[in-house]
Image (cartoon, grey):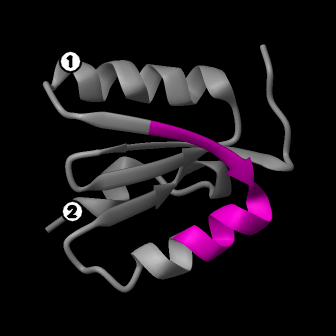
Amino acid sequence: MSSGSDRRYVVAGGDVVAAFANKDDAAAQYRVMVGANLDVDTHEMTVERWDQVRRELSRNRDITVVDVAAGEQFWQKFRP
């Protein structure tokens, strides 16, 4: 499938925004969020743009940002 280290595939739903390095992983996350009955948005962007977006989103403590492409995992973000 399509992947590229210069692109990020971003899936946003509820209070979570996740970035992936390939479309297949992003599509799987999309299906999970839709299955959870969330309104979901998807975006494809350059790594540079993702870095900007992530910095902006990090200012909002109500949003959880997970950069799976950079090795972060969901469970790390939701531990007590």
Which residue sits furthest top?
1
Q: Report the amino acid beneath label 1.
A: Gly
Q: Is residue 38 above or below residue 8?
A: above
Q: Is residue 23 above or below residue 12?
A: above
Which segment is the magenta one?
42-53
Any mark on residue 79, and which?
2
Q: Which quadrant would the C terminus be assigned to in this image?
A: bottom left
Q: CA distance from mark 2 to mark 1?
A: 22 Å
Q: Nearer the viewer, residue 23 or 71?
A: 23
Graded by Cα atoms within 10 Å as few (under 14), some (14 to 19) or many (20 or more), the crowding at tag 1 reads few
Q: Position of residue 42 (x, y in %)?
A: 48, 37
Q: Position of residue 45 (x, y in %)?
A: 70, 49
Q: Secondary structure at mark 2?
A: loop
Q: Residue at x 53, y 30 (%)?
A: 26
Of the residues under marks 2 and 1, which one precedes in the sequence? 1
- On the image, which quarter does residue 10 sit in? top right
